[in-house]
Image (cartoon, grey):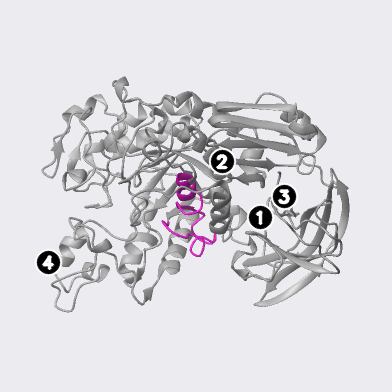
Amino acid sequence: MPIALPHHDGSSLFVSQPAPEAVSLGDTVRLRVRVPQGWGPASKVWVRSVQDGEPRYDAAIRLGAADGWDWWEAAMLVANPVAKYRFLLEVTETHDAGAPAGEAVGSTVGRSYWNLNAQGLYRRDVSDAADFRLTTFAPAPEWLRQGTMYQVFPDRFARSEQADGHPVPDWAVECSWDEPVVGTGERAATQFYGGDLPGITGKLDYLQEFGVDVLYLTPFFPARSNHRYDASTFDSVDPLLGGDQALVELVAAAHARGIKVMGDLTANHSGAAHEWFVKALADPGSEEAGYYYFSADHSSYESWWGVPSLPKFNWSSEALRRRFITDEDSVVARWLKPPFSLDGWRIDVGNMTGRLGAVDLNHQVARLIADRVRGINPNAALLAESTSDAAPDVTGEHWQGAMTYSNLTRPLWSWLAKDASDVNFFGSPQTGPNRIGAEDFLATHQDLAAGFSWGVRQNNMNALNTHDTARAATVMIDGGPAVGAVLAFCLPGVPVMFAGDEFGLEGFNGEDSRTPMPWDVPDLVRNDLRSAYATLGRLRKELPALTGGGVRWLHAQGDALVFIREFSGSSALVFAARSDASVIVDSSVLSEAQLQALGAAPRHHCGKVTSSQAGPSGVDGVWLRAEGPSAGVWALPGTAVPGR
């Protein structure tokens, strides 16, 4: 049965500002919550906020009813840069407590009180950790949350004509474009296929076919590996990629097509061959020696995960801070300015940057980088990698969003998992993803998304996989990647395609996933998803609800998920199933106009999905059905709010 529970999500339906992220310290905002009349009705509602560390309760007024929902509104002072709040609902009539169908529930007599936070509804007190959040930090550029991102690993994307003239470096093992990649061992980092930046420039028209707005490049600095996270300098573009001019031309050509370009920067470490580290190693008294962590006798040094080729930066060094961030021609600044004009950075292992044992300078460094980036270009984006629970570090104050796997990618793999043994499951000791039901997918997703403000949630990267993970096609059931793509494109966040997803490329870990693009090798194309991705990219532009609407879950049980993204002007409903499934959506969760529109054909589908107005057993609603792994996206009318 549908999930019909009190709801608030921080989107513009529920927050009075024109954009929920455009809030200033000292503002008084109006916050709304909707309560299904079949669940309540609520007799009283309060907003509970935490102001200067102390809880405060502000009474709400009932705005009225619309389509079977009571709407309540309360005013709240934004007293702190991160304003935490939840709703407290008093109910005096018997109701079913939102229990799943078939579950025995006793009557509620007298008053009962319910807390609604970003994780859900609780008939008990809860920690502040999962409260909703409004923040007063500078908002991210609108193009980020509205964008569709495409990630390119330059060595494996495309070779230009000039690539044949690039000499093979001494660290590399030259490979033909169709030679299989090696996923483990030393060769995983030294196989050299010779993709370059002019090759990417030549494929920009191809990217436009998918509605790509944001091109994210993994590092382009000279290095001694194919991944280039071990930079030997930050002052130039690797000549193997075409040099500085190739980046200038790529960015200019992308901008001419309306595509933003983001770079990838290692603020946690350099390479052991970096000019700074070479000098630091040779001269313990040098300024550069202070950039790193050396032992007292200068015989050893700290590195990322103990990998000697990746010596770790010591951010206690003021000289490093100037050279990397604050100087006019610093690493952070130089590539954002003309003639390069990058549109932002993704910070590699942002969660580890500035942290070592008892030393924690992470937020100081993040703030310095953010201030520098926004001082150069207020419309630039700044994302950070954080492979676990990213919310404590990604508040929007500095990093505007996270490249993280915890709140979507990992639970999505588990919901769509096949028997994929010996797959790297994000570095855990598991031999592959554990299969879970839709209930656990939703619980995990809500748990690990709850710590983000609504603005940050919209900027987080929604990836099925990246250059650091196994491929979805290796992990998921047949048809699973197409279903997963629908969720990545339709849930709050920035959908990310890693080059080759559209061809169904496979890989058991990150290195094995970095297969050269099969431009001229059709035999490598196991599952052609190009048409599906192109349609999803168009939908992001055509349906505003997908890039700014709130999210409300209507069903999560076993093999099927249903949610709606909703604005006052338009909405979009998504139905996803991993096997044969049927779900009834009725008037307890949608308006009559929305139910009527749901009977039409979906705007996008994969697999086989159908909707029919005549539900089974005389139930009044719309019956959604899937045969095998399937998903559908329907355009619906907007959600009515009393008084608006």
Q: Is residue 378 above or below residue 216?
A: below
The residue wearing badge 2 is 559
Whether the residues at callouts 1 and 3 have beta carbons within 8 Å, the answer is yes
The residue range painted magenta reads 386-414
Report which quarter residue 563 is drawn in: top right
Q: x, y (%) of residue 226?
A: 23, 43
* Mark carried by residue 22: 1
Label 4 – label 3 distance at C-alpha: 57 Å
- Badge 4 or badge 3: first in the primary sequence: 3
Q: Main secondary structure of the magenta part?
A: loop
- Badge 1 or badge 4: first in the primary sequence: 1
Labels 2, 4: front one: 2
Q: Residue at x 50, y 49 (%)?
A: 436
Label 2 – label 1 distance at C-alpha: 38 Å
- Badge 2 or badge 4: first in the primary sequence: 4
Label 2 – label 3 distance at C-alpha: 37 Å
The residue wearing badge 4 is 282
Mark 3 residue type: Pro
Whether the residues at callouts 2 and 3 have beta carbons within 8 Å, the answer is no
Mark 2 residue type: Asp
- One can see residue 542 in this view: no
- Badge 2 or badge 1: first in the primary sequence: 1
Residue 395 on the magenta span: yes
Report which quarter residue 22 is drawn in: bottom right
- Location of the N terminus (image quadrant): top right
Q: x, y (%) of residue 416?
A: 47, 41
Q: x, y (%) of residue 516?
A: 28, 32
The residue wearing badge 3 is 18
Where disc 4 sits, the SS reads helix
